[in-house]
Amino acid sequence: MNNYKDTGKVILAGAGPGDPELITLKALRYLQIADVVITDRLVSDVILYEYTNKNALILHVGKQCRKGASTPQATINELIVDYALQGKLVVRLKGGDVSFFSNMLDELQVLIANQIEYEIIPGITAASGAAAYAGIPLTARNHSIAVRFLTYYKKDIVEDIYWKDLSQTNDTLVFYMSSDTSDELVKKLIDNNINDDKHIAIVEQATTPLQNVYSCAIHDYAKKFGSNQFVSPTLIIIGKVAAFHDQFQWIENSYSKENYFKPVAKNNYESVRA
Ligand code: SAH
């Protein structure tokens, strides 16, 4: 066990998007000496059960968007603080990068309030992972000069003027947590006159052996993929650059509908080692 004098220490670390080899050496080094690992659902079992030291207590606090069990943020905060205040080294592991669509702010506030020491370690966010493993350059000269990271979960983009802007821009648009709303999302863009040189790439379970990429011109989406149920997690890339997938794809689709990230049983934080 690590012995921190008073308050322990918390490492907020990104685990990368799926492929366990996409974690940083720095996060890995902390997992090898951690007392407690508090993990999201979107973290590979290989990282948890092969890379993490065998004596670490592993707690699953995954949120599962609209489905299944989910641990309230207040409980997650409590767990982090309780273990840290026992003087332990706690790794709070999040899928992808820590600062993209995560509750890092909440956790930082709680750490500050309790005067607990912390470090923040970045990870490869799903957009980078999906783009690489789908053969899509997110900004490609003469195609797109910027990327926007967005979500249409809970219909977050409300203003009509913003839809107009999203439909007209040449920036690449990456939507997180939006596979359940993808039909409506595409419809909004088409209603706002998105150009027909824009493509869409839907990347299921990016960087895992179960990855699938579905891509087409945005105007063909409804015909080809409308009402599809995509396997969680899924990322949506929209823009001219999405068309590059057809040219630069280097991984075959798995065509599997199995889940790489297993759902966690309700109220069962503590995992059983395989
Ligand atoms: N912090 C994470 C994002 C958390 S929000 C990051 O930086 O990647 C969860 C959303 O991320 C999912 O709904 C999905 O849209 C996206 N995502 C995470 N991992 C993914 C993966 N392997 N493949 C596709 N999308 C993924």
Image (spheres, rainbow, N blue to C red):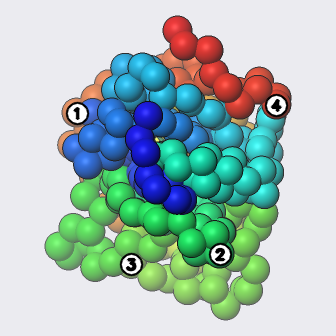
Please tell me how many numbered marks the rendered image carries.
4
| 5, above or below 166, in the image | above
Amino acid carrying label 1: it is Trp
Left or right: residue 17 compared with residue 37: left
User: Where, quadrant-wise, is the N terminus in this rendering?
Assistant: top left
Residue 100 or residue 174, whichever sits in front: 100
Q: CA distance from mark 1 to mark 2?
A: 47 Å
Which of discs 1 and 4 lies nearer the camera? The answer is: 4
Q: Which residue is mark 3?
A: 170
Check contact, mark 1 vs mark 2: CB within 8 A.
Answer: no
Which of discs 3 and 4 lies nearer the camera? The answer is: 4
Amino acid carrying label 2: it is Ala
- Is residue 81 visible in this depiction of the protein? yes
Where in the figure is residue 273, as x and y percent of width and height? 54, 13
| 142, above or below 241, in the image | below
Q: Which residue is mark 2?
A: 113
Q: CA distance from mark 3 to mark 2?
A: 42 Å
- Residue 267: image tag: 4
Which of discs 1 and 2 lies nearer the camera? The answer is: 2
Q: Residues within 10 Å of mark 4 (few under 14, many from 20)?
A: few
Q: Earlier in the sequence, mark 1 or mark 4?
A: 1
Q: CA distance from mark 3 to mark 4?
A: 45 Å
- Residue 250: image tag: 1
Residue 252 or residue 67, whichever sits in front: 67
What residue is at 35 percent from the left and 36 percent from the top? Answer: 33
Q: CA distance from mark 1 to mark 3?
A: 25 Å
